[in-house]
Amino acid sequence: MGFRKKLEKRRKFEFLPFIMGKRIFIFEYVSGGGFNKDEIPISLFCEGFGMLVALIKDFKSLGYEVCTLIDYRIYHLSTILPNDNRIIVKKDDNFLNHFKILVKDSDYSFIIAPDSRNVLYNLTRIVKKYNKILLSIDLEGIVIGSSKMNTYDFFKKNKLLTPKTYLIPFKKNKLDSNFIIQKFGDLKKTIIIKPEDGVGAESIFLFETKEQIENFFQDYYSKIDTKRSYILQEYIEGKDLSISLIGLQESLNNEFKNPFILTTNSQNVNIKNPKYESEYLGGYTPINNYQQITRELTEILEKVDLSSFSGYFGIDLIRSEDSKYYFIEINPRLTTSYIGIRNVLNQNPSKLILESNLGHSMPRDLKVQFTSIFRRLDLEYMKSNLGKELKVDLINHLMRLIPELVTPPISLNESNQFTCFIATKTKDLTSSNRRMQKIHQILRTLSFEIVK
C-alpha cells in the first residue's frame, strides 16, 4: 500500500495535527456524536448537519483549516464536508474525549448544540477551560437564552413586549393541571405549554379551550418528559419572525456596541394542534418589507443591553396584526436561518463572526442581495427498498441535479422514509417559490413522494 493510501486510511480513525495555519474546530452535536449511543433524531440531524455543512464551507473559503467530529452512522456523508480532518465517533466511544482533543488542538472553537439540558453550556465551558478562542456565544449569554424564565425576566427588565409567562408547578410528579386551568381562565385567551429549556418548536402544545387541557392530561405521560420543567405562556397571534444578529465584543474604549441585525426572517412553525408534536420546518429570508421592519427593530434594540451576546445569535418574535413586536425567545447559538442567510448576503457571514470577535464594527457595505427559502422536506421513496450502495449513488445523483440540497435525502434506518434540507438562492421570493416547485418535480421524477 502506497503512502497516500495509508494516509487516507489513517484519517478515518485518527486526528492528524496540522502543520501550518489557523485551525478551527466546528462541532455540531447531533451529527458529531452527541447521540452515538442513541437513535439519531432525524429532523434535528437534518437541520444540524445542514448548519455544519454551511459553516465549514464558509470558514474554509476564508482559508481556515477545519476539523470536526462525525457520528459513525453518517460517515458516508462526510464527503460533502470540505473539512481538513475529522474523527469518527463510534458507538462505544465517549464523544467528550474526542471533543476535548480537538478543542486542545485547535486555535478556535465553534459549537452548534442544543441549549437544553445544559448541553451547550457544558461544552462551552470546556472550551473556556482550555483557554481557546470561542466563536460561538459565551456562558453568560447561554445562561440567559437557555432558560425561558431567564429570557422572560430579561425581556421584562429591558421593557420589551413579551407574552405573560409562568413556570408551571408540579403536583404529585405531574404538572399541576389546576394551575394551568386557572391561568387559562385568568388570561382569557389561547395558551401554549412548552419546556422551560426547550429548543425551537420542540414539544410546544397549544390550547384554545379548557376541554383541550383536560383531554391533554388524560394522556399526560406520552407527551410530557417528567424530568423537565415547563412553562405556560399566553399565545400571541401574528407573524412568526426571527432576527439573526451579530453581537460585538467589547471595543477598545471599553464600551459595548449594539448588535447588528443581519436579516429578518420568516419562520414556518406549526403549533396549531395539541394532539400532535409541534415542528419547525424552516422559513425564508429576507421577509417582505424587511428594510422598514429592520429599522423598527434596530430602534427597539438600541435601548436593550445585549452585551452578554457576542457573535451570531437569534431572537424569535411575533409581529402582531397591529404591528407590535412581541419578543419570545433568544437563541444563544447558530440557528437554522444561517443556512439561508449565507445565500442572501453580499459577504461571508463567518467573516463577520470573526470580525465581531475582534470588536470590529460591521461593514457599511453589507447588503441583502438575494432571497432564500430554507426548509426541511420529509420524503418517501416509492420504489422497493434501497441498498446502502444504491442510496449513496442516489444521493450523489440528487446533489448534482439539485445543488440547493444542503443536507441530502437521508434515511438512518432500513425504511423508505427520507428527510433533506434545501436552501434556494434567487433574486426574489417569487423566483424561490418557482425553484422549490421545480425541485419538487425533480424529486417526484426520481420516485420520491413529498410527505411534508
Image (cartoon, rainbow, N blue to C red):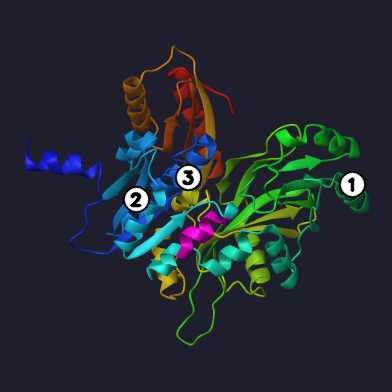
For the view shown, which residue lies furthest in the top direction?
A: 384
Q: CA distance from mark 3 to mark 1?
A: 38 Å
Q: Callout 3, which amino acid?
A: Gly
Q: Find residue 78 and report its horizontal and vertical position in percent.
A: 32, 40
Any part of residue 345 in sight: no
Tell how many labels. 3
Give the numbered dot on residue 178. Answer: 1
Q: Are marks 2 and 3 in contact (CB under 8 Å)?
A: no
x 85%, y 39%: residue: 213
- Residue 351 lies in what quarter of the image? bottom left
Q: Residue flagged by tag 2: what amino acid is it?
A: Thr
User: Between residues 312 and 45, which one lies in front from this camera angle?
Assistant: 45
Q: Amino acid at mark 1?
A: Asn
Residue position for label 3: 48
Q: Which residues are magenta?
A: 118-125
Whether the magenta-drawn stretch holds residue 123 is answered as yes
- As rendered, which of 78 and 244 lies closer to the eye? 78
Q: Position of residue 191 (x, y in %)?
A: 82, 47
Q: Which residue is mark 2?
A: 68
Nearest the camera: 403 or 254? 254
Secondary structure found at label 3: helix
Q: Residue at x 50, y 67 (%)?
A: 138
Residue 298 falls left or right of residue 119: right
Task: State how far apart marks 2 and 3 are (Cα).
Answer: 13 Å
Residue 140 visible in the displayed image:
yes
Mark 2 and mark 3 lie on one chain; the one further toward the N terminus is 3
Q: Residue at x 50, y 55 (%)?
A: 334
Q: Which mark is residue 155?
A: none
- Sequence order check, earlier mark of 3 and 1: 3
The crowding category of the residue bearing disc 1, from other C-alpha atoms within 10 Å (few below 14, some 14 to 19, many at least 20), is few
Q: Is residue 10 magenta?
A: no
